[in-house]
Structures are given as C-alpha cells and as structure tokens.
Amino acid sequence: MNWTHDPVVVCPTCHGDLLPQDAHLHCVVCDHDWSVRGRTPLLFQAKRVGRRDRVMRRMYDVLSPVHDPITEHVLPHLQGDAPDAVLRRRMVEALDLDSLTVGDDGVAHILEVGVGGGALIPYIAEALPAGVPVCYWGLDLSSGMLRKCRARLPIDGVNVRLVQADAAALPFAENSMARVIHVGALGTFADPEHALFEMSRVARPGSRVVVVDEELDTARSNRLRHRIAFKLLTFNQSTPQAPIELLPYNAENVHSANLSRFFYLLSFDAPRGHA
C-alpha cells in the first residue's frame, strides 16, 4: 500500500482519524478498516450509497473511456459555445486561486468532488500561485473514471491524490479544504442538498466553493437542436438549474450565472459557522 497518514483524510462514517495498517486504513474511533486498491483508498460503503448514485456510478464506469473526448469535442459543438478549454479556465477563475493560502499544516488543500478523468487538473495547475504548496484531492465514486484520471498523472506543478468515495459522505476533516469544486453531476445526486452541505463542511470558513452543472440559458435564442440536445443531456434530472435554495443558509457571497448555454456556475464562500 502506497499511502501515508494525512489528518485531512478521515473516516467517512464517524470522521475519526485513519491510520495505515497492513493493506488498509484503520479508523481509530469506530474501528472500521477501509480497503486501499493500488494507491487509491476506497472510503465508501456500497450499502450506504443511494440507489440513484449507484446507477450513475455504473454508467460512468461504462462511459469512462469516451467521457473526456465527448466533453472536450462533442459538447461544445452541441452548445454552439466557447471551446472546452475556455469554459474550464472560467471555472478556475471563479476559484480565486490568487488568494489561496495554506492551512495549519503548511499546505493548501484543494478538493474536486467528482474529479472524473481529471480534465480540470491541468487548468488548476497552471493557475496556482507560485510558492504555495498544494495538495489536490480528486474524489470520485466511479472506479472507471478514477483509472482514467490516474493515467493522466503526474501533472507538473501539483501533487494529486485520488480517493474513491461518495459525495454524500466526504472522507475529509471539517474545515480542511482551501478550495472545493464540483463539475457536472450535482443534479444527478440522490441528495444534492446534503452533497452541498458536505462540500461546505470540509471547506475552511470563508473559502470558495464552486459548483458547475446543467442549466439552459433562457436569455439566449435556443434553437430546436439546442433544446433537444439539452433534454438528452439532462434526461435524468427533473429541474436542471442552479440549486441556490439548497445551499447552507449561512453561505456567504453567493453568486450564480450562466457559464455557457448548457451550464451554470454557482459560487459561494463557506459559512463561518456551519449550518
């Protein structure tokens, strides 16, 4: 097992400290042993994953070989919008990395919930301020997507560590992340409100959280092909839109805008006192 102890990573069930032990991670509080596959800890219990999330996990496992090419080349064409690289740089800009600061351990921890194939990581790496040690945590429930992400590594300028876990039970300590970002799956989660709470819980008070997902920009002139493509893209969502009403009640500096024809960008600062 190539895994070293890091107090940022905790038991997803009880938030107890995890210590490397033989071929697993052992929780010192609830006594649960968590498996490690290769260099990736498996910090979720299948029986606790919602049915909808299990379905989406299987779907992403199947789509993992073609997911990034579709996102990079097909989706911008369907939207009739800016190239994928332009949209990703806008996401990174919303993170305000210029003001990134380290935590008590001397490291700035950044979490991407739903890291997928890791397409965003190079854009994060190029925007990191010089002289700030960064650990980038890529979390996903799909083993197929994590394999694609692992194949992309290493990426110059950033230390990336991958974790297989559920967005509804993030295996990270409270107030541990300097930034949190999620792209493209919130609307499919079984409990998006709780996922947003979890992102807020692990973020340091006042730090930026950015969420990107589907919403049709009704201010544009959307042709029939745009409306059909958007419907196909969001077939499993009842109301694809920015879930401002689901944010913690004490979230600060909330801002929502259309990132592109098919996507919103919602940002907020983590509450100074959690909901």
Image (cartoon, grey):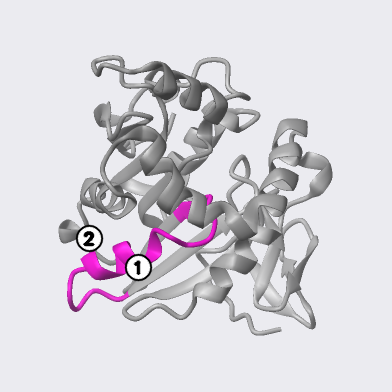
Q: Quadrant of residue 99?
A: bottom left
Helix, strand or loop status at disc 2: loop
Mark 1: amino acid: Pro
Is 124 a magenta residue?
Answer: yes
In the image, which disc is placed on residue 122?
1
Q: Earlier in the sequence, mark 1 or mark 2?
A: 2
Q: Which residue is drawn at 50% across and 49% down?
A: 70
Q: Residue shown at 34%/81% (left/top)?
A: 156
The correct choice, above or below, for 252 with respect to 116 in the image is: above
Residues 65 and 39: in front is: 65
Residue, x 65% and y 84% (percent of image)?
2
Nearest the eye: 213 or 76: 76
Q: Where is residue 27 in the image (x, y as percent from the top left)?
A: 72, 64
Q: Does the magenta stretch include residue 38?
A: no
- Viewer-side residue, 6 vs 159: 159
Quarter of the rendering containing residue 103:
bottom left
Please, is residue 240 above or below residue 211 in the view?
Answer: above
What stretch of residues is rendered in magenta? 112-133
Quadrant containing the N terminus is: bottom right
Q: Closest to the observer: 120 or 196?
A: 120
Q: What element carries label 1?
A: helix
> How many marks can you see?
2
Q: Mark 2 points at which residue?
A: 100
Instruction: Pinpoint residue 13: horizontal percent, then vertical percent.
Output: 70, 48
Confirm whether residue 103 shows in the render.
Answer: no
